[in-house]
Amino acid sequence: MRVVRTVADVRAALDGRDDVGLVPTMGAYHTGHEALFHTARVESDFVVASLFVNPAQFGDEADLAAYPRDEARDAAIAEAAGVDLLFAPSLEEMYPAGFQTWVEVEDAARGLEGDARPGHFRGVATVCLKLFAIVRPQRAYFGQKDAQQVAVIRRMVRDLELDLAIRVVPTVRDADGLALSSRNARLSPAERKRALALPRALAAAVGAADPVAAAHAGLNGLHPDYVELLDLDGATVLAAAARVGPVRLIDNVLLKGSLQ
Ligand code: PAF
């Protein structure tokens, strides 16, 4: 696996390739990222992962500063998972002086995470469009856990006639059911136990006549930011978020249809 840091080096490395899978990431890899890499590896001749902690999608300076960064560890995991090229640009490479173009996806970015994190999806859509323009992949891979992110990216791809497929990889969970997230490490053992109410409530709501009410009923004292149905191109997911100690957890389950 090669590590490159500039747009010019990505372009040179990809010259002549026409079957490229891109996995956009912010690092701090766990098994969920490995599932994205493995899926991209199976489906694409050449796999690029980007590793860039995107300040534009963080509302809170402290959250950005606390985001785990360990490039050597991440590079070893990416290489073992079959990534061919790791694009790890600097802040200046992605947002050079004078940068002033932003992507604003409207309805898909409202509600749920969009309300809880103002500006978040503007930062996500902008960095993803820029990564798509740099790498020009045939496919890009995202996790189901960030379901609204998938809805926003798919809307952008459709609205701007971008020529790539957005592939969704199922959420990877720990044995106790908690969806993997680099933020889970901040949970104390007691908080982690409380956090399990979220995936359990969502799982219990699958098949219920009123899934939102069923999930609320199963939250075991957790106060959710939201429990809502989200439409993803005809598929329906039940999505929820709740704060447990220092961590804001998000999760969702598929109720109807397919995410592919
Ligand atoms: O899901 C993420 O890790 C980020 O939102 C992404 C897609 C890499 C954009 O920075």
Image (cartoon, helix red, strand yellow):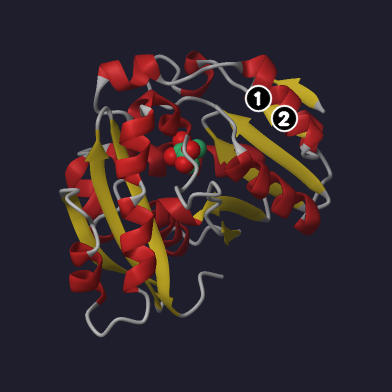
Find residue 232 and report its horizontal and vertical position in percent. 39, 69
Q: Could you tell me which secondary element the residue under label 2 belongs to?
A: helix
Q: For the point 49% across and 62% down, which residue is it?
A: 161
Q: Residue at label 2?
A: 77
Q: Could you tell me which secondary element the residue under label 1 belongs to?
A: helix
Question: How dense is the environment of label 2, judged by Cα within 10 Å: few (below 14), some, or many (20 and up)?
Answer: some
Q: Nearer the viewer, residue 92 or 47?
A: 47
Q: Is mark 2 within 8 Å of ligand 1?
A: no
Find residue 226 and report its horizontal and vertical position in percent. 19, 55
Q: Residue at label 1?
A: 74
Determine if residue 8 is in view: no
Q: For the point 48% across and 32% down, which residue is it?
A: 182
Q: Nearer the viewer, residue 9 or 23?
A: 23
Find residue 171 and report its horizontal and vertical position in percent. 52, 54
Q: Nearer the viewer, residue 2 or 72?
A: 72
**186 left or right of 163 in image:** left
Q: Marks 2 and 1, how far apart in space?
A: 5 Å
> Is disc 2 in contact with disc 1, using a CB cutoff of under 8 Å?
yes
**159 left or right of 15 in image:** left
Amino acid type at circle 1 is Asp
Is residue 166 shown above or below 234? above
Q: For the point 27% across and 17% down, which residue is it?
A: 61
Question: How dense is the environment of label 1, judged by Cα within 10 Å: few (below 14), some, or many (20 and up)?
Answer: some
**5 left or right of 26 in image:** right
Is residue 235 shown above or below 113? below
